Image: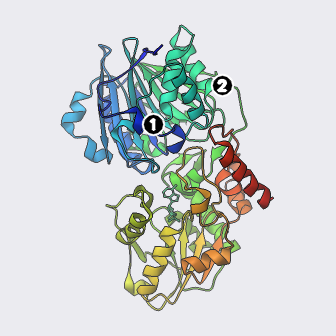
Amino acid sequence: MKHLDVIPSPDVPAETSLENFRPATGLREACGVAAVSGAKEAANLVFLALYALQHRGQESAGVVSMDSGGRCHVKKAMGLVADAFDPEVLEGLKGRVAVGHTRYSTSGESHQRNAQPLVVDFRGSPLVVAHNGTLTNAATLRRSLARDGSIFQTEVDSETLVHLFARSRHLDEEGRVDDALTQVQGAFALVMAIGDTLYAARDARGFRPLVLGRLGEAAVVVSETCALDMIGAEFVREIEPGEVVRIRDGKVQSLRPLRPAPRSACLFELVYFSRPDSVVWGASVNTARRAFGKQLAKEHPVDADCVVAVPDSANSAALGYSEESGLPFELALIRNHYVGRTFIQPSQADRDFRVRVKYNPVGSLVEGRRLVVVDDSLVRGTTSRGLISLLRIAGAEEVHLRIASPPVKFPCYYGIDMPTREELIGSSRSVEEIADRLGADSLGYLTMEGMQDAVSDHGPFCTACWSGNYPAPLTDMDAEEADAMQLQLDELS
Ligand code: AMP
């Protein structure tokens, strides 16, 4: 029997067909979420918050608002926040509750049907979900739900939550939310609107950030504090790991349905993903990165003329390196700000090209000089390889690459887009081999101990992409993949 509780809203494109569906595990979501409850211009505020969260996702943007008559208003579009919305569109997004999302997924095709917030009708009321993170048992749950008749409209794992909510035996809304959230594994920092009630929740390990703010009478929930600053909201606190917060007309109530688990805050948020003007895990991201850079200089000093950052994400770490080493910091690489992050293009050829489009050296600062180039991380090595070649063409005498985090050896299954092990340049090569491949005169990575010591007050952290220690079960990983991963972990230990 088909399950008809969840009816796709009209904004789901009609071309959606079951044949196009790939399993939910194929999509990794690294996103920004924002929600406002109890403000006259809720959608406008969410739009502005998303603007500040643009770095968390550039593939699509969406805002959904709920008006007092129980109607929802939806605007979702591919591309950047600024391109998706104009005053006229925002004017149409009426109501005192709004939910927004910026999406960043590089595996799988870019399709509007995967754009969030997800919107469905649930027994006559709008149900809206915006999710950051990856559910590690979404495909397994999806298969079983589909067998029982659930019809999925998108490829995103967040839709699993919607079906779990709809099929719950609990009669009350809160019970349904708890029921859905207790069945999923992995990483979620999400906001959900059911009619004009807002729920914000984080998984029990607290992989991804989500914070609560206040703007007058209104309550605000956003991925990062920089979005609170953007709208002039005051930071109240983090949504705690395992906490579900219910908000009605700006009034906040805390619920604790999830079984506690050891905290596993993503350390890569501090290394790369979050904005330096945000406070994440109680740490200023800028201060954390500066400390990483200082530690890097202690661990890997080099005789050189100046320190150059790979802008913008390595700026703070490079300043830290410069401070500790006493070498001058030079703005020798200029970034074109109108180009998105290098991973946005799906094929490797496109990525190589984008490095050139994105960065250009300042000839007079580079020619005949010995450079320490600091980047926050090495993933595939595409950026560094391209940059080193650009710097050599510009006349650099020596290029010493310093990375303000350890070698990324394992994919992330909790919401940061990381390629397969084979594509990760650090997964199986020695530091010398990597330096050679990239064309660097020397290469030094920050050690795991050095990195963790620098932010020891703010953990415990998830370090899976460096260590292979995955704190939450990887239920969806198929048996073959899991065996291969285990073999590699055994080899390492
Ligand atoms: P790669 O060029 O593949 O080595 O990627 C490393 C570069 O991309 C660094 O400059 C980082 O700032 C940035 N980066 C690191 N991780 C990611 C990610 N998950 N998505 C997009 N960019 C990333």
Q: Mark 1 points at which residue?
A: 155
Q: Quadrant of residue 390?
A: bottom left
- Density class for disc 1 (Cα within 10 Å; few <14, some 14-19, many ≥20) is many
Question: Is residue 259 or residue 382 the one in the foreground?
Answer: 382
- Which residue shows up at 49% across the image and 40% down it? 223
Does 175 sit above or below residue 279? above
- Which residue shows up at 44% across the image and 37% down it? 21
Q: Can residue 220 be seen in this view?
A: no
Q: Which amino acid does label 1 sit on?
A: Glu
Q: Quadrant of residue 295?
A: bottom right
Task: State the image coordinates of residue 216 (x, y, percent, origin top left).
Answer: 40, 28
Q: Name the residue under label 2.
A: 258
Question: Is residue 203 or residue 296 the one in the foreground?
Answer: 203
- Density class for disc 2 (Cα within 10 Å; few <14, some 14-19, many ≥20) is some
Task: State the image coordinates of residue 237 (x, y, percent, origin top left).
Answer: 56, 35
| SS at mark 1 in the image | loop
Task: State the image coordinates of residue 165 (x, y, percent, origin top left).
Answer: 52, 19
Q: Can residue 123 be seen in this view?
A: yes
Residue at mark 2 to residue at mark 1: CA–CA distance: 26 Å
Q: 308 left or right of 119?
A: right
Does 296 sit above or below residue 73? below
- Which residue shows up at 40% across the image and 29% down it? 153
